[in-house]
Image (spheres, coloured by chain):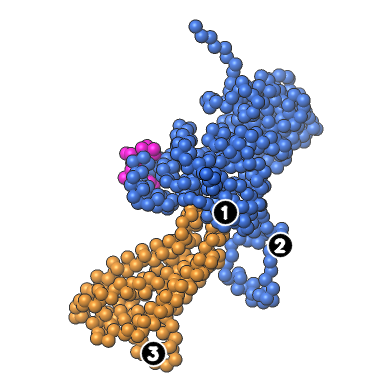
Chain colours: A orange, B blue
Amino acid sequence: MPYPLFAYSGLVIWTFFSNALTQASNSLVENNSLLKKVYFPRVIIPFSVVVTSLLDFLISLPLLLILGIYFGFGLNLNFFLMLPLILIILFLSVSGLGMALAAINVKFRDVRYILPFFIQTGLFVTPIIYPLEVITDFRYWILLLNPLTGVVEFWRQLISGGADLGWGLLLLSTFEAFLIFAVGLIIFKRTESFFADIV
Amino acid sequence: MHMEPIIEVNGISKRYRIGAKMPYYSLRDVLMEIIKSPQKLIKTSSNSVAEQFWALKDVAFSVPRGQVVGVIGRNGAGKSTLLKILSRITPPTSGEVRLRGKVASLLEIGTGFNPELTGRENIYLNGAILGMTQKEIKQKFHDILSFAEIDKFIDTPVKFYSSGMYVRLAFAVAANLEAEILIIDEVLAVGDTSFQKKCLAKMGEVAQGGRTVIFVSHNLAAIEAMTDRCLVLSGGKLVLDADSHQAIDYYLKSLSKETQADVSGWKDRQGSGEARIINVEALNLKNMKTSFFNPEEPIKLSVTVDFKRKLKADVGVSVEMANQVPLFATQLSDSEKTRVYSGTKKFEVVIDPNRLRPSPYLLTVVVTSMDRQQVYDGVLHLPLFQIEGYNQSKNFPLDGRPGYIYFPFKWKSE
C-alpha cells in the first residue's frame, strides 16, 4: 500500500475519533442551559455529537475512495459490507470515552484543556502513521489495548482488498469497544442526576 | 372510585453547598492540593454545616388530577428548586417525588432555540426537546402558528426575530404541549399586556382540559385568577397549603410582618452625600409601621434626614408603579417655606386621598437644593408599600380594570 493512501486511510479514522471525542467531552458544559432547564435523557447530548461527527466521517469517505482508485485499488464490495461494522465499533468506543469525559468535565472544568495533549499522544499509540508490523516487542501488546488498533488494521485491509482482513484483531477491538462503552455509560449514569446542580 | 393523586411529594429536601470555597473545580487544583498535603487523601474533609444551604426542607403535598396549583413565596423561598425537582432536572437530597403522568416543564422561555434555524425548524426542535413527537408537533403546528402570530416570518431564521416574536413563538410551543402535568415557572413576565392575557387565557384553557398544572408566579392577580389552591413557601419550607384566596392573603400578611425595605443598605442611590436619608417609613393612621394599606386608606410617609452641614434643602417623594414609572410626586416646598436645616430632621407627608389601586408601589425620595439642581441624597425605587385588594374590601375588587389610579366618579343612567 503506497504511503499516501496508507496515511490518509488511517488519518480519516483518527480525525473522526479526535474530533468526536473532543466535542463529546465538551458537549455537556456547552449545553448547560438545556441541562438546567429541561428534563430529557442526558445521554442524548454526547450521542448526538458523536453521530454528527460520524456523518462528517462518511462525507470524507469519497475522497478516500478516489485516492484508492488513483493508486489502483478499485472499489470492492467488502468495503461497503463491512462499513457498518466499523461505524458501530467507532461509535461505541468514542461515545464510551466521550460520556465518561463529558461527565468528568462537568465537575472538573479544566479537563477540556488537558484533553488535547492526550489526544495528540493517542495519535502515536495508534498505528495511524506507521504500520503495526514495525512494532514487535512488548509494545505490540500495549497497542492491542487500544480499540482503534484492530479497526485501523482491518480498515486498511478492506481498502486494499487484502485476503486476510484481520478478524482476530477486529474481534478484540469490538470487545474493547463494548467494554469502554459500558464503563462510560456507568460513569455517566452514576453522575448524571447531579449535572444540573454543578454544571 | 378513589383516585390516586397525580403528584405525590413526600418530605423532599434539597441541600446545596455554598461558602467561601470557589465553585469552579479544576483538576489542576485538586492535583496541587494532593501534592501540597497528601494526608488529605486519607481523611476526606467533609463540608462543614456552615457551608450547607437547604433550598427546600421537608416539603410534602399531593395534587389530585386536574387541579391547578399555584406556588408563591419571596425570592429565594425555594419555588424554582421545587419546580426543578418536580420536573426531574435535579434530584432531591432526601425524600421522594412520585409523578403518575407525563410531565412537561417550562422553566425558561426559549430554552433550546437555535438562532440560526427558522421559526418552523425551531418549533420542531423545541417541541422535541420538550418531549413531543414529530407527529404531535405536526398535528399542533397550525395551533402553534396561529397562537404565536408570526405566520409571515415562519421561514425566517429566529435570529432576525424581535424579542417579542421570539417569546411568542416559544410560549406557543410550550402551551401546546400534550402532557398530563404542566410545570410553569414565572414565564409570563414577558411580552406585552395583550400577549400576557392571551397566555393566561391559554393556561386557563389547559386547566379546563383536565390537565394538572403547577404554576409559579409573582403576579398574584394571575395566581388568584388561575389557581384553585396555593402553596406558600418561605425559606425552603412549606408554610401554608390552602385555597388560593386564603394563601395569597396569608402571604401578603406575612410579607408585611417582615421588616420594611432598609434604606441604609439600599443600592440604588445617588447624591453628593451632604445630607443623608437615614430612614423612610410608611405608617398607617395609628402611626404603625406597615407595608400594606387598604384601598383609600391614608398613607403617612415619614422621611428622616441627617444633614451633615447647614443646608437649605427641599425634600421630595414620588410614588412609582412597579415598573419604576412615576405616578405622581410631591415635595416639601409645595406646603411650606423651606428653611436651613442641620442635624437630624424628620419630614412627613400624608397621601390622602389615596387613589391608588391594589398593586405594589415604589418610592423615590430625594433631598435637593432649592432650585433642584443639586441632589444631596436620593433613594431610588424603594419598594415600601403595597395596596391590598385581595381581602375584605368587597367594594374594591381586583377586577382587572386597567390603570393604577382610581377615582370615585359618579355615573348616572337614564
- Give the residue at x 41% y 73%: A93
Whether residue B151 sits left or right of residue B92 in the image: it is: left
Q: Is residue B312 visible?
A: no
Residue located beneath label 2 in the image: B48
| Depth order, front residue of B244/A70 | B244
Amino acid carrying mark 2 in the image: Ser
Which of discs 3 and 2 lies nearer the camera? The answer is: 2
Total residue callouts: 3
Residue located beneath label 1 in the image: B97
- Which image quarter holds the N terminus of chain A? bottom left
Query: Do the residues under discs 3 and 2 have CB atoms within 8 angstroms?
Result: no
| Callout 2 and callout 1 share a chain | yes
Q: Residue furthest top?
A: B414
The disc at residue A135 is 3
Q: Is residue B146 magenta?
A: yes
Magenta stretch: dominant secondary structure: helix
Instruction: Tell me how far mark 3 sits from mark 2, CA to CA.
Output: 54 Å
Instruction: Tell me how far mark 2 sits from mark 1, CA to CA.
Output: 28 Å
**Circle 2: is it few (<14), some (14-19), or many (20+) Cα within 10 Å?**
few
* Image mark 1: chain: B
| Up-down relation of residue B21 to residue B238 (above or below) | below
| Up-down relation of residue B140 to residue B357 (above or below) | below
| Up-down relation of residue A197 to residue A116 (above or below) | above
**Circle 3: is it few (<14), some (14-19), or many (20+) Cα within 10 Å?**
few
Whether residue A70 sits left or right of residue B211 in the image: it is: left
Amino acid carrying mark 3 in the image: Ile
Over which residues does the magenta segment extend?
B145-159
| Callout 1 and callout 3 share a chain | no
Whether residue A114 sits left or right of residue B330 in the image: it is: left
Q: Position of residue B105 (x, y in %)?
A: 49, 48
Amino acid carrying mark 1 in the image: Val
